[in-house]
Image (cartoon, rainbow, N blue to C red):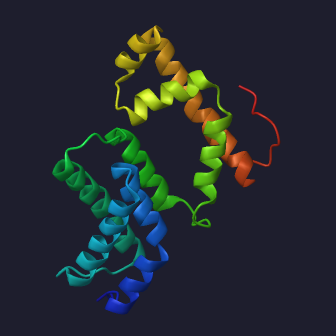
Amino acid sequence: MPMKLTEQEVLQVLMKSRTRISAAAWVVVHDAHAAEDIFQNVALKAMTREVSFETEGALLSWAFITARREGIDWLRRHRRETHCLDSEILEVLEQEWLTAPTRPSGERIEALQDCLESAPESARRILRLRYFDGCSCEEVAEQMGIGLNAIYKRVSRLHESLRECIERKLGNSGVAGPQPQ
Protein backbone atom coordinates (compact mmCIF):
# COMPACT_ATOMS: atom_id res chain seq x y z
CA MET A 1 0.00 0.00 0.00
CA PRO A 2 1.49 3.40 -1.00
CA MET A 3 2.46 5.78 1.78
CA LYS A 4 0.54 9.01 2.03
CA LEU A 5 2.22 12.33 2.70
CA THR A 6 2.24 13.30 6.36
CA GLU A 7 0.70 16.57 7.50
CA GLN A 8 4.20 18.00 7.91
CA GLU A 9 5.20 16.93 4.38
CA VAL A 10 2.01 18.44 2.92
CA LEU A 11 2.76 21.74 4.61
CA GLN A 12 6.41 21.69 3.48
CA VAL A 13 5.44 21.04 -0.16
CA LEU A 14 2.83 23.80 -0.10
CA MET A 15 5.20 26.32 1.47
CA LYS A 16 7.94 25.44 -1.02
CA SER A 17 5.45 26.13 -3.86
CA ARG A 18 3.74 29.11 -2.23
CA THR A 19 4.80 31.63 -4.87
CA ARG A 20 3.65 29.45 -7.76
CA ILE A 21 0.30 28.60 -6.13
CA SER A 22 -0.31 32.25 -5.24
CA ALA A 23 0.60 33.21 -8.82
CA ALA A 24 -1.97 30.72 -10.11
CA ALA A 25 -4.60 32.49 -8.01
CA TRP A 26 -3.33 35.95 -8.99
CA VAL A 27 -3.67 35.15 -12.70
CA VAL A 28 -7.40 34.71 -12.07
CA VAL A 29 -8.11 37.50 -9.55
CA HIS A 30 -5.40 40.11 -10.29
CA ASP A 31 -5.33 41.03 -6.60
CA ALA A 32 -2.23 40.20 -4.56
CA HIS A 33 -4.06 40.18 -1.22
CA ALA A 34 -6.82 37.94 -2.54
CA ALA A 35 -4.20 35.61 -4.07
CA GLU A 36 -2.49 35.31 -0.68
CA ASP A 37 -5.84 34.61 1.01
CA ILE A 38 -6.55 31.97 -1.61
CA PHE A 39 -3.18 30.32 -0.97
CA GLN A 40 -3.98 30.21 2.75
CA ASN A 41 -7.38 28.66 2.01
CA VAL A 42 -5.74 26.05 -0.21
CA ALA A 43 -3.24 25.20 2.55
CA LEU A 44 -6.02 24.97 5.12
CA LYS A 45 -8.10 22.71 2.87
CA ALA A 46 -5.08 20.49 2.20
CA MET A 47 -4.49 20.10 5.93
CA THR A 48 -8.12 19.39 6.81
CA ARG A 49 -9.16 17.26 3.83
CA GLU A 50 -10.29 13.71 4.40
CA VAL A 51 -8.49 12.65 1.21
CA SER A 52 -4.78 11.97 1.49
CA PHE A 53 -2.05 12.74 -1.01
CA GLU A 54 0.33 9.98 -1.98
CA THR A 55 2.82 12.13 -3.90
CA GLU A 56 4.00 15.72 -4.10
CA GLY A 57 2.78 15.81 -7.70
CA ALA A 58 -0.75 14.82 -6.68
CA LEU A 59 -0.76 17.46 -3.95
CA LEU A 60 0.53 20.21 -6.26
CA SER A 61 -1.91 19.30 -9.02
CA TRP A 62 -4.76 19.49 -6.53
CA ALA A 63 -3.41 22.78 -5.08
CA PHE A 64 -3.18 24.53 -8.47
CA ILE A 65 -6.65 23.41 -9.50
CA THR A 66 -8.06 24.41 -6.12
CA ALA A 67 -6.35 27.83 -6.25
CA ARG A 68 -7.81 28.44 -9.69
CA ARG A 69 -11.30 27.41 -8.57
CA GLU A 70 -11.03 29.52 -5.42
CA GLY A 71 -10.01 32.46 -7.61
CA ILE A 72 -13.07 32.00 -9.82
CA ASP A 73 -15.27 31.78 -6.72
CA TRP A 74 -13.65 34.98 -5.39
CA LEU A 75 -14.45 36.76 -8.66
CA ARG A 76 -18.08 35.64 -8.45
CA ARG A 77 -18.39 36.87 -4.86
CA HIS A 78 -16.82 40.23 -5.56
CA ARG A 79 -18.53 40.99 -8.88
CA ARG A 80 -16.46 44.07 -9.46
CA GLU A 81 -14.69 44.94 -12.64
CA THR A 82 -11.85 42.48 -12.84
CA HIS A 83 -9.55 41.48 -15.59
CA CYS A 84 -9.11 37.77 -16.08
CA LEU A 85 -7.75 35.49 -18.74
CA ASP A 86 -9.76 33.09 -20.84
CA SER A 87 -10.18 29.63 -19.36
CA GLU A 88 -8.09 28.24 -22.25
CA ILE A 89 -5.16 30.44 -21.27
CA LEU A 90 -5.63 29.51 -17.60
CA GLU A 91 -5.47 25.82 -18.59
CA VAL A 92 -2.21 26.40 -20.51
CA LEU A 93 -0.72 28.34 -17.59
CA GLU A 94 -1.83 25.65 -15.16
CA GLN A 95 -0.08 22.99 -17.25
CA GLU A 96 3.03 25.18 -17.45
CA TRP A 97 3.11 25.57 -13.66
CA LEU A 98 2.67 21.85 -13.17
CA THR A 99 5.45 20.87 -15.58
CA ALA A 100 7.86 23.81 -15.50
CA PRO A 101 10.98 23.48 -13.40
CA THR A 102 10.90 25.75 -10.38
CA ARG A 103 12.71 29.04 -10.91
CA PRO A 104 13.45 31.81 -8.47
CA SER A 105 10.06 33.38 -7.84
CA GLY A 106 9.99 36.58 -9.84
CA GLU A 107 12.50 35.83 -12.60
CA ARG A 108 10.00 34.57 -15.19
CA ILE A 109 7.46 37.31 -14.39
CA GLU A 110 10.15 39.99 -14.65
CA ALA A 111 11.22 38.60 -18.02
CA LEU A 112 7.61 38.67 -19.22
CA GLN A 113 7.20 42.26 -18.02
CA ASP A 114 10.41 43.31 -19.79
CA CYS A 115 9.27 41.59 -22.99
CA LEU A 116 5.85 43.22 -22.83
CA GLU A 117 7.40 46.65 -22.24
CA SER A 118 9.64 46.26 -25.28
CA ALA A 119 6.73 45.12 -27.50
CA PRO A 120 5.20 47.67 -29.87
CA GLU A 121 2.18 49.58 -28.52
CA SER A 122 -0.14 47.92 -31.08
CA ALA A 123 0.93 44.48 -29.82
CA ARG A 124 0.40 45.50 -26.19
CA ARG A 125 -3.03 46.87 -27.10
CA ILE A 126 -4.05 43.57 -28.74
CA LEU A 127 -2.87 41.60 -25.69
CA ARG A 128 -4.56 44.02 -23.29
CA LEU A 129 -7.89 43.84 -25.16
CA ARG A 130 -7.75 40.07 -25.55
CA TYR A 131 -6.52 38.93 -22.14
CA PHE A 132 -7.05 41.72 -19.66
CA ASP A 133 -10.21 43.33 -20.99
CA GLY A 134 -11.66 39.90 -21.82
CA CYS A 135 -12.54 40.73 -25.44
CA SER A 136 -13.04 37.94 -27.92
CA CYS A 137 -10.83 37.90 -31.01
CA GLU A 138 -13.84 39.17 -32.97
CA GLU A 139 -14.19 42.15 -30.60
CA VAL A 140 -10.45 42.86 -30.79
CA ALA A 141 -10.64 42.80 -34.60
CA GLU A 142 -13.54 45.28 -34.52
CA GLN A 143 -11.83 47.64 -32.08
CA MET A 144 -8.53 47.52 -33.95
CA GLY A 145 -10.16 47.79 -37.39
CA ILE A 146 -8.34 44.64 -38.52
CA GLY A 147 -9.69 41.42 -40.03
CA LEU A 148 -10.38 38.47 -37.74
CA ASN A 149 -7.83 36.18 -39.41
CA ALA A 150 -5.19 38.89 -39.04
CA ILE A 151 -5.94 39.09 -35.30
CA TYR A 152 -5.61 35.31 -34.94
CA LYS A 153 -2.26 35.41 -36.73
CA ARG A 154 -1.02 38.39 -34.71
CA VAL A 155 -2.01 36.83 -31.39
CA SER A 156 -0.28 33.60 -32.38
CA ARG A 157 2.88 35.47 -33.43
CA LEU A 158 2.77 37.53 -30.22
CA HIS A 159 2.61 34.36 -28.11
CA GLU A 160 5.60 32.93 -29.95
CA SER A 161 7.51 36.22 -29.81
CA LEU A 162 6.92 36.55 -26.05
CA ARG A 163 7.96 32.93 -25.47
CA GLU A 164 11.20 33.48 -27.40
CA CYS A 165 11.88 36.78 -25.62
CA ILE A 166 11.35 35.19 -22.20
CA GLU A 167 13.63 32.27 -23.10
CA ARG A 168 16.36 34.69 -24.25
CA LYS A 169 16.08 36.71 -21.04
CA LEU A 170 16.21 33.56 -18.91
CA GLY A 171 19.07 32.10 -20.94
CA ASN A 172 17.15 28.98 -22.02
CA SER A 173 17.35 29.28 -25.78
CA GLY A 174 21.07 29.79 -26.19
CA VAL A 175 20.26 32.32 -28.92
CA ALA A 176 21.09 35.99 -28.51
CA GLY A 177 18.84 37.36 -31.26
CA PRO A 178 15.39 36.72 -32.67
CA GLN A 179 14.62 33.26 -34.00
CA PRO A 180 14.10 32.95 -37.78
CA GLN A 181 10.49 32.48 -38.80
Q: Is residue 16 above or below residue 113?
A: below
How far across and down, in percent of the image, does residue 130 sit?
41, 29
Q: Is residue 174 above or below residue 115?
A: below
How far across and down, in percent of the image, does residue 59 sit?
35, 74
Q: Which quadrant of the figure has residue 23?
A: bottom left
Judging depth in this view, the residue of 16 and 2 nearest the camera is 16
Q: Quadrant of the C terminus?
A: top right
Task: Indicate left or right for 11 with 66 as reference.
Answer: right
Q: Residue at x 57, y 25 (%)?
A: 123
Q: Is residue 172 visible?
A: no
Q: Is residue 59 above or below residue 6?
A: above
Q: Residue at x 24, y 43 (%)?
A: 80
How far across and down, in percent of the image, does residue 15 sit?
44, 79
Q: Is residue 143 visible?
A: yes
Q: Which quadrant of the figure has residue 5?
A: bottom left
Q: Residue at x 64, y 26 (%)?
A: 120
Q: Which residue sits furthest right? A: 176
